[in-house]
Image (tube, rainbow, N blue to C red):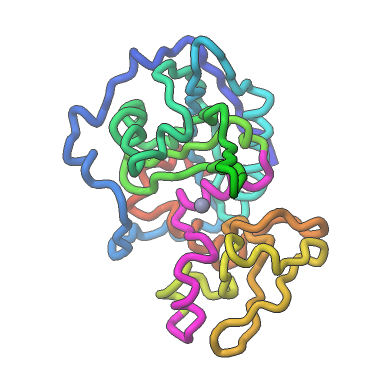
Amino acid sequence: MRYLMLVLVFALSACSRTPFWKDNPSSYQSFSTYDNEIQLAPPVNREQHMHVFEIVVWNVVDTQNKVVIGDAKLKLMLDQLNKVYAAASIQFEITETNELHDYYTYESLVENDFYNYYNYLTNYNSPNVIDLYLVDHERNLCYNDGRVRGCAKGRGFTTTGGWLSSIVIPKEDVTNMKIPIHEFGHFFNLEHTHYNYTHQHSGHDCAKTGDKICDTPPDPGAGAYGAMVNYTDCEMYGAYDENGIEFKPMINNYMSYYAPCYMKEYAFTPEQIKVMKDFALDHKRAAFVKTSL
Ligand SMILES: [Zn+2]
């Protein structure tokens, strides 16, 4: 596969960009859920096309304590994305990298139901490109209240609707083998494998319930069931649903929350790939396609 050109434009300043949303308040409001009823007719020979999506990278930096993800790490991320997404006829190209000095940490974006994210950070979004914001974590994410101690760290989130669509990941996860690919999975309409899994497991139509994907087995979720997994053979053992059927989730699925398996690479299922492939030309995403090769 040929590598797409990584173009780095450091000269562009955040302040010089037009806050598109201010001229288009109705577009600004039209985010959130998908409606699947309108589909663009796919090109007749789309199997032979690679659809290229443009990424604009934003390093959100604290000018007092500057951490910037440079082109070497971005290229690693881009190569991983392009390797995995080729199966869905999707490729990515980074066309700009900018520094954003309007500083927010991951935690400050997430708090209060993503208030800072929707009210400030998305002002920088460019229409019809994937804005990828790279952020720092707060310094102390660990706690010890005398009885319980632990650490809590978010790994990224994606806004999937309309032109507000953008992806936020921590800088430290840019070269992670799963996290960017997982977030771009959301961008192309995939849910977590554990999403509403109880509905899928109780015999309802697998195409309409849970993650709406029939070849991902019901997944009770890593949060409660991660301890039931043998990460060497990548299988869950000894966890049963209310009907006595053993859970056998796909541990190594990109859209699960499980830790990596030692012997098995992460993967998407054929149906997940089909959903992404179809969605790439859906009315919510068709305008994002820069070129079709
Ligand atoms: Zn996710």
Left or right of residue 39, residue 50 in this image: right
Residue plotted at (58% across, 19% down): 68
Residue plotted at (73% across, 75% down): 237
The answer to if 174 sits in the magenta stretch is no
Q: x and y percent of residue 131 in the render?
A: 44, 33
The quadrant holding residue 208 is bottom left
Q: x and y percent of residue 258 in the render?
A: 65, 58
Q: Which one is in front, 116 or 182?
A: 116
Vertical placement of 122 versus 229: above or below?
above
Residue 96 is at least partly visible in this image: no
Q: x and y percent of residue 62 in the render?
A: 49, 16
Vertical placement of 125 versus 166: above or below?
above
Residue farthest to the front? 146
Start and end of the magenta stretch? Answer: 176-205
Vertical placement of 216 versus 63: above or below?
below
Residue plotted at (52% across, 47% down): 183
The quadrant holding residue 26 is top left
* Quadrant the N terminus occupies: top right
Vertical placement of 116 versus 36: above or below?
above
* Quadrant the C terminus occupies: top right
Residue farthest to the bottom? 243
